Image (cartoon, rainbow, N blue to C red):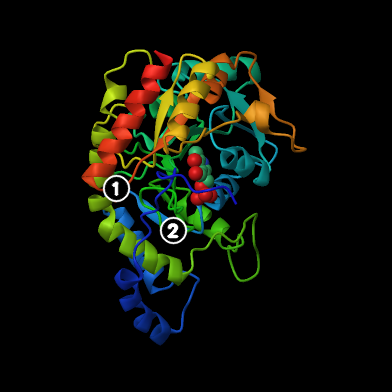
Amino acid sequence: MPKELKFPVVRPDVPEPNTWKPYLDSLYASNQFSNFGQYWIQLAREVENYFPSSTCIPVANNTLGQVSVLQGINVRNKKVMLSNFTFSATLHAVIQAGGIPCLLDVDPISGELTIETISKGIREFGKPEVVIYTRTFGARRQIDAISEFLVAESIKFLVDAAAGFPTQTDQTQPNECIEVFSFHATKALGIGEAGAIVGNSSMMERIKQATNFGFASSETFRDGTNAKLDEFSCIRALAGLKEYSRVAEARQKFVSLAYASIYSTEKFITLENDGSWGWSLFPIKFDAETTLDKFARCALSLGLSGKRYYFPSMQQGYVGTANVLKVKDLSQSEAWARRTYCLPTYGRYSQAESEEIALIVQRSLEQIC
Ligand SMILES: Cc1ncc(COP(=O)(O)O)c(C=O)c1O
């Protein structure tokens, strides 16, 4: 096994056993370990506190959450547009739900879809049933204008917000938009494997049925899967939510302390640290892949891990058997995929550690400037 570097790319903030063990007695007393039990209901309510006008369906993970949304909507043999710059799970979800994936390009500054890139896709392929918008690296940008555009075009809107659980109450979730989060151990709100579907769409009941094998009545079932979140995961998620504001604040502080020198460097693009998201990873988009390699090699030699993420792009990486459509020009999403490197963000660290990482980053930047 390779030797672990001093600063690993992930230092999970999974809740300690003493924070969720107290729930176990009443869990065993209830005798219900899955299928929308008491802690599933409690978790849904607590997530809904972050989204006052929406309902929540806790799920086994983000991937199955997205599959369930697409099955609930029914995308079989219909086009679903998604970014070329996302994690493989987004593409897998479309394929698993029987949709026809159609890859779009992104904005050069945000790395995300825009009305322009979606419109280009519509010009080349016609209107899709659904557009999936990936909130890259968990950033929570305003998406109202895109939502209004899609509503006007009668296109449904799914937001893959895997790492984008908000740090405060979010009043901005647009009408008819459905977001899916991941509570994977690598995320700021990380508990192992889990996720949540959140939305105020009229489709939510149908989507909940899709998470439960598609059962619509005792005699019939539609397309569906098993995306139910069991009660053990729910209690870890409840404990994680209790800790989340502290963890998110610590991660934001870590980003300011460790990566200050990156913010002051004009040559690179990164995310602004505006305090509204939880930071799972800290992305840097370099001017070229060779610069990325030089930076990464130097940082690694000094003990700081990192990783390329949303790499490879969907068009370059996917070698499965589904037919994947793509717009002619994917150059911006390819640049993001090939030139982005992610550094760790920690919720637990000492002042000395954050200072050492800041120094490693500074040294690595000197190598490439
Ligand atoms: C954009 C995106 N979508 C989906 C996923 C998959 O989430 P999960 O592991 O909960 O299925 C990830 C995982 O990190 C992701 O980054």
Under 8 Å from ligand 1: the CB of mark 2? no
Viewer-closest of 320 and 219: 320
Residue at the image point whose x is 69% and y is 25% from the top: 325
Quarter of the figure with the C terminus: top left
Residue 269 in picture, x, y percent from top left? 38, 19
Q: Is residue 157 visible?
A: yes
Above or below — where is 180 with respect to 310? below
In the orientation shown, which residue stands out farthest toward the bottom?
Answer: 29
Viewer-closest of 100 and 85: 85
In the orientation shown, which residue stands out farthest toward the right?
Answer: 321
Q: Label 1 belongs to which residue?
A: 53
Residue 34 in picture, x, y percent from top left? 49, 72
- Disc 2 packing (10 Å; few <14; some 14–19; many ≥20): many
User: Which amino acid type is shown beneath numbered disc 1?
Assistant: Ser
Assign a secondary structure to mark 1.
Answer: loop
User: Which amino acid type is shown beneath numbered disc 2?
Assistant: Pro
The mark found on residue 58 in the picture is: 2
Assign a secondary structure to mark 2.
Answer: strand
Q: Can residue 118 be seen in this view?
A: no
Viewer-closest of 217 and 297: 297
- Residue 271 horizontal side relative to residue 325, left or right: left
- Disc 1 packing (10 Å; few <14; some 14–19; many ≥20): some
- Residue 40 horizontal side relative to residue 310, left or right: left
Residue 44 in picture, x, y percent from top left? 36, 60
- Residue 1 horizontal side relative to residue 201, left or right: right
Q: Label 1 to label 2, Cα distance in Å?
A: 16 Å
- Residue 295 horizontal side relative to residue 240, left or right: right
Above or below — where is 160 with respect to 154? below
